[in-house]
Image (spheres, rainbow, N blue to C red):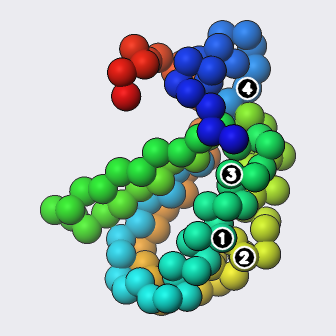
Amino acid sequence: MKRSAQQINELINDGSSVYSATFIFRIKNYDSEFERLNNIIDKVANTNLGFLGKESWSNEEENKRSVVYYWDSLESLQKFSNHPDHQKAKQNYEKWYSGYEVIISKVLTFKSDNGL
């Protein structure tokens, strides 16, 4: 279930923890296996009760993409990360990406005018 920016902000203001997992990568080559696994991984995230939402960004000039996932706990994030299809994608990343970084952060502040 995707939560709104306002709901995420309320969680933080109520003292609940919110974590982000930022996946930054350069595309090498996508194929049908990538598309299949990517769709499964999206479904796995969306059915995880701790999933709060995600955002995607791209920098065409540098051929970089970024996906930021928001979670209500490190346990929820770990459950997502350890899913068998996610693990399979990680094992085959060199087929699809020429490089990647993952940044796990605790969100201290989340502000929004709810216009996005």
Q: Which residue is mark 4?
A: 17
Observer-nearest of 40 and 50: 40
> Mark 4 near mark 3, Cβ–Cβ under 8 Å?
no
Mark 4 or 1, closer to the camera: 1
Mark 2 or 1, closer to the camera: 1
Q: Which amino acid type is shown beneath numbered disc 4?
A: Ser
Using the image, determine if residue 44 lies above or below residue 34.
Answer: above
> Mark 2 near mark 1, Cβ–Cβ under 8 Å?
yes
Can residue 60 be seen?
yes
Q: CA distance from mark 2 to mark 1?
A: 7 Å
Of the two numbered discs 4 and 3 on the same chain, state the one appearing first in sequence. 4
Residue beneath the point at 62% across and 32% down: 3
Q: Which amino acid type is shown beneath numbered disc 3?
A: Asn
Q: Residue furthest left?
A: 61
Residue beneath the point at 43% across and 78% down: 97
Of the two numbered discs 2 and 3 on the same chain, state the one appearing first in sequence. 3
Of the two numbered discs 4 and 1 on the same chain, state the one appearing first in sequence. 4
Q: Horizontally, is 50 left or right of 69 in the view?
A: right
Of the two numbered discs 3 and 1 on the same chain, state the one appearing first in sequence. 1
Q: Position of residue 71 (x, y in %)?
A: 69, 40
Mark 2 or 3, closer to the camera: 3
Q: CA distance from mark 4 to mark 1?
A: 26 Å
